Image: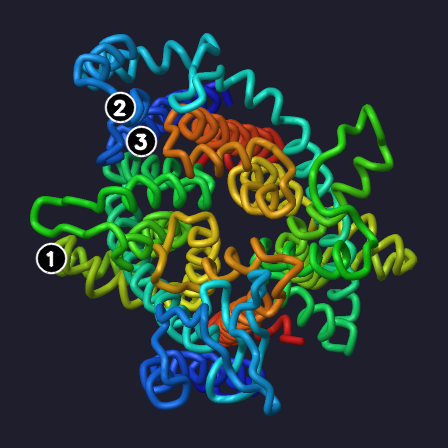
Amino acid sequence: MRAVAHDKVALAFGALFVAIVVLCLFAPVYAQDVAHTGPDDNHITETVIVDGKQVDVVSPQGVPIGPTWKGRFLLGADSNGRDVAVRLLYGGRNSLEIAAIATLITMVLAVLLGTLAGYLRGFADGVLSRLFDLVWAYPAVLLGVALGVALAVGGLNLGLFTLHSGSLLLPAFVIGIVFFPYVAKPLRAHALSLREREFVDAARVMGSSPLRIMVGEILPNLTSTIIVFVPLIVANAILLEAGLSYLGAGVQDPNPSWGTMIADGIRLIPGAIHLVLVPGVMLVLTVLSVNVFADGVRDALDPKAIVRGRF
Amino acid sequence: MAVFLARRLAALVAVLFAITVLTFLIFQAIPNGDPALRMAGRLATPQQVQDIRVQWGFDKPIYVQYAKTMEKVLDGSVISYTQQINVEQEIVRDLPPTISLALGAGVIWLVLGVLLGLLSAMHAGRLLDRVLTVFALTGISMPVFFLGAIMLYWLGYKWGLLPLGGYVPLTSDPWGWFTHMLMPWIALSIVSIGVYSRVLRANVLDVMSEDYVRTARAKGLSERRVLIHHVLRNSLMGIVTLWGLDFAWVIGGGAILVESVFNLGGVGQYAAQSIGRLDVPPVMVITMLVACAVVVLSTLVDLAYALLDPRVRLS
């Protein structure tokens, strides 16, 4: 971690990501005290005063107002007369929440199944590896969309707990499943090589149970691999969430998400390009900040990468 | 080699079977999606709904439905629920835009990815490398539909440089085909250019520190010859196998998004539209096709590796 602290570029982008997260967490405060409107409130028939003139929020031709750079409609309105800045922050909250839960699901599944497959080898490894191959062979967007649509219509009922359609956990669940083989496969390979090492033999000779060896000996040695993958999965989860929502298989209307906001904007092209630009730029900035930070973490934890030299 | 081959082929068949079962189950599990109710329309009597259910076999046990479905998939007679047209004919009709998109973008990202990665590695640590790294990381962070929308607005509407989406067949108007495909190609390839240039840069830097590269330099070979014959050849191995897989992947991933933005009318857009209509058969067939293509390609890549590298066979 000290190496990351010395990498100023990675650190700066990490700080940018934290700033975006904090900004999105303050969405309700911004909505109440600055914009004085909620994310789903329509102002389609209202007017606002810009430069001393009264302007329709949404023109009679259906073109919404662009950025006013004032408290109300700071970044303009959408075709329903909703405040884009407010929706941007609430949408960011949804996107980040989904990405965080999805990453958690991916990492838990991958660490559990990857370690098991690598350590147990034999039959268990055969079954689990085929499972990884199976999920991995599915194109991410197609599998995500198929699952997303299947679940979005009726929700999910797993006996003990039920997810209602429209719940944010549904896209998070879908994305978590889609990405887990990408982490599980390298973790399995790593665990497979670790189990042949002397310290594992030593533990086995001492009479440690397989569970104890996996948790106490193998897992600590997988930590750096796991840490390298976390920001990568977060970045890809944000991107996939946007893609799924864009196709209508992620966050459901009227709940905002950067993906659905861009989809709304594309429908109005060439009318109101700010509807595409505002969520799009935010999306790129967020993913870029995670990716640059991930690059720095990888270089810091992979000794080979340091020899190669960054930049 | 024979044992290895047999094992890989057995695994291939097992995974292909599992893919069809999984796909069938995902779509069978769509709640509230009773296809008979949807097909009968709003004013149907219970008797009509029941007739459709019997006629399409929705009343049979699930494994019978699976067997029937697979029979239809294999002899090419799947009918979509909502439009009641032959799905496989529709897919074949939609293939040209998708293949144009994937092949063109594939060539662009392979060539540019290798070129930029090589440039980056040759100038490692200097300004050009930094600029290219920023470019690659931005590319990796760019959602294809956002990039597509921006190009559509500025290159299409504002400056009128390129047509606003749609597809023109190569056989009827090659230049029109090219101009219509240009924006979709760029949108689809940017992410992969970023990934490939990063991977190649790392590979080249790895290979450059090998002993045989030092030997080649010591023999007095020109830097150009060392770079192309010794370094690049060995760095490309991984890239080319990656490309084989990504190619099948793109059809089921980025192509869906890009085709929708530019209204290309390809297989991906057909899938997206069918998803919107909750029309199970087309999505199921396309998902099966793409997933199978990925598995078959990855097996071919494994076999090629085993053929070239005996160490893989033995492990």
- How would you rate the neighbour count of disc 2 (Cα within 10 Å): few for under 14, some for 14-19, many for 20 or more? few
- Quick one: quadrant of the C terminus of chain B? top left
Which element is circle 3 on? Answer: helix
Q: Which residue is mark 3?
A: B27
Q: Residue at x 60, y 73 (%)?
A: A307
Q: In the rendered view, does A85 fall on the left or right side of B15?
A: right
Horizontal side, residue B164 vs residue B74: left or right: right
- C-alpha gap between disc 3 and disc 2: 25 Å
- How many numbered circles are shown? 3
Which residue is the site of mark 2? B43
Q: Nearer the viewer, residue A129 or A294?
A: A294
Subunit of label 3: B
Q: Amino acid at mark 2?
A: Leu
- Looking at the picture, do discs 1 and 2 lie on one chain? no
- Mark 1 residue type: Gly
- Tag 2 secondary structure: loop
Q: Which mark is residue A207?
A: 1
Indicate the position of residue A174 as horizontal and vertical percent values: 33, 49
Q: CA distance from mark 1 to mark 3?
A: 48 Å
Q: Please give left or right for residue A180 compared with residue B111 in the image.
A: left
Amino acid type of the residue that numbered disc 3 sits on in the rendered structure: Phe
First in residue order: circle 3 vs circle 2: 3
Q: What chain does badge 1 belong to?
A: A
- Category of crowding for the residue at label 1, using alpha-carbon neighbours closer than 10 angstroms: few (below 14), some (14–19), many (at least 20): few
Rendered image quadrant of residue B212: bottom right
Q: Answer few, some or many: residues within 10 Å of disc 3's Cα (few below 14, many 20 plus, some between 14 and 19).
A: many
Above/below status of A231 relative to A115: below
Q: Is residue A40 visible?
A: yes
Mark 1 lies on a secondary structure that is loop
